Image (tube, helix red, strand yellow):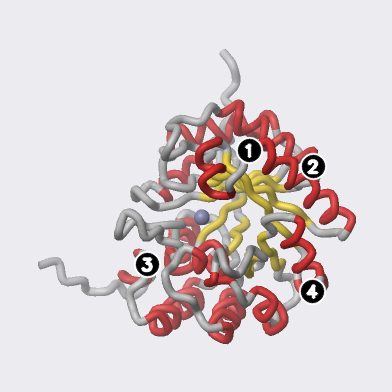
């Protein structure tokens, strides 16, 4: 019998990249004022998050929520040990970002695994996106920047249905060859399930053992944290999430987006897996965001509060 490829124990610790300031805010209807974004980012760092996606150098007229990318980078003050990343959509975006080269140390670039999603998202074929990323990554490598490549619709496409695993892994391999030391696999519209996730990352580790593999789950259908556990079982130690569950897609109404960082941290810490994040401080950031936005955010721990084993809350069960 073949030995099982799944590790018998879960990792002692994981890395979390907070994507709320970019992935989250980009997909919310409001545009947060720059000082509120800066306070949010600095609060996230103070809560112990050591990887933060700060903003994106997309065209301001396309994504007005992130039109102040340069202002955010100029204003934010991060403690040593925090890795700041920015999303770079193309070479023009890289040119703009490099004007503030000293303010970040990591970039991410993305494409979709499925043609229709890529065409609707960025208006070109997957091959053209890959060619563009190769140019961006080559220049970023010269600049000494760390590179994460993100593959959207890795676990299924809302237009095309299933996406073959070998196709996703071929893309991941090409992106790694182009200079990405990390590949993030996005469940962009919440189509993954735990069985598929465990099989996917087991196969990914076999082919891409030299690359950091990052899981980026959305909670669109409530399966985000179940998928995290499945990824852990397949040896994944790197995750992305969004404070407050920011990043809800407005269509269909009420659909949720990224898994919430506070829900992820709560679950992992309860399982004995260290995250380095102080949950109470993180919840403070989420609460201040709720006040600024003037509405409730979606995360569960934000509503229920953290687990207090020493002084359990008396919940009304009526
Ligand atoms: Zn996302």
Q: Are marks 4 and 2 in contact (CB under 8 Å)?
A: no
The residue that label 1 is drawn on is: 126
Query: Residue at the spot x=68%, y=84% of the render?
Result: 75
Q: For the residues marked 2 and 3, what is the alpha-carbon distance in whole angstroms?
A: 39 Å
Task: Locate the C terminus and report the quarter of the image it occupies.
Answer: bottom left
Q: Which mark is residue 178?
A: 2
Q: Is mark 3 within 8 Å of ligand 1?
A: no
Which callout, 1 or 3, points at the residue further toward the start of the chain?
1
Q: Label 3's element?
A: helix
Q: Are marks 2 and 3 in contact (CB under 8 Å)?
A: no
Q: Label 1's element?
A: helix
Which residue extends farthest bottom? 35
Q: For the residues marked 4 and 1, what is the alpha-carbon distance in whole angstroms?
A: 29 Å
Q: Which label lies toward us, 4 or 1?
A: 1
Q: For the residues marked 1 and 3, what is the alpha-carbon distance in whole angstroms?
A: 38 Å
Q: For the residues marked 4 and 3, what is the alpha-carbon distance in whole angstroms?
A: 36 Å
The residue that label 3 is drawn on is: 301
Q: Which mark is residue 275?
A: none
Which callout, 4 or 2, points at the residue further toward the start of the chain?
4
Q: Locate residue 274 relative to residue 84 in the image: left or right.
A: left
Q: For the residues marked 2 and 1, what is the alpha-carbon distance in whole angstroms?
A: 15 Å
The residue that label 4 is drawn on is: 100
Which callout, 4 or 1, points at the residue further toward the start of the chain?
4
């Amino acid at each position: 019998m073949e030995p099982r490829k799944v590790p018998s124990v879960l990792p002692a610790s994981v890395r979390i990249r907070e994507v709320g300031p970019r992935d989250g805010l980009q997909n919310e209807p409001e545009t947060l004022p720059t000082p509120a974004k800066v306070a949010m980012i600095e609060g996230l760092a103070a809560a112990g998050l050591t990887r933060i996606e700060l903003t994106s150098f997309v065209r301001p007229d396309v994504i007005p929520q992130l039109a102040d990318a340069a202002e955010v980078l100029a204003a934010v003050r991060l403690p040593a040990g925090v890795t700041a990343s920015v999303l770079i959509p193309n070479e023009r975006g890289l040119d703009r970002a490099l004007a503030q080269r000293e303010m970040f140390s990591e970039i991410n670039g993305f494409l979709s695994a499925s043609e229709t999603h890529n065409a609707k998202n960025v208006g070109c074929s997957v091959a053209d996106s890959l060619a563009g990323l190769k140019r961006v990554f080559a220049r970023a490598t010269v600049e000494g920047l760390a590179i994460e490549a993100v593959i959207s619709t890795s676990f299924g496409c809302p237009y095309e249905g299933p996406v073959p695993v070998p196709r996703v892994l071929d893309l991941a391999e090409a992106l790694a060859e182009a200079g990405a030391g990390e590949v993030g696999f996005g469940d962009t519209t919440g189509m993954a399930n735990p069985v598929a996730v465990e099989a996917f990352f087991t196969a990914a580790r076999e082919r891409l053992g030299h690359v950091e593999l990052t899981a980026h789950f959305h909670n669109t259908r409530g399966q985000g944290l179940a998928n995290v556990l499945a990824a852990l079982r397949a040896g994944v130690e790197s995750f992305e999430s969004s404070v407050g569950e920011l990043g809800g897609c407005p269509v269909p109404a009420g659909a949720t987006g990224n898994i919430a960082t506070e829900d992820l941290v709560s679950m992992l810490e309860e399982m004995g897996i260290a995250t380095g994040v102080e949950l109470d401080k993180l919840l403070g950031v989420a609460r201040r965001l709720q006040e600024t936005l003037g509405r409730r955010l979606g995360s569960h721990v934000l509503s229920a509060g953290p687990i207090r084993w020493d002084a359990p809350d008396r919940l009304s069960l009526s």
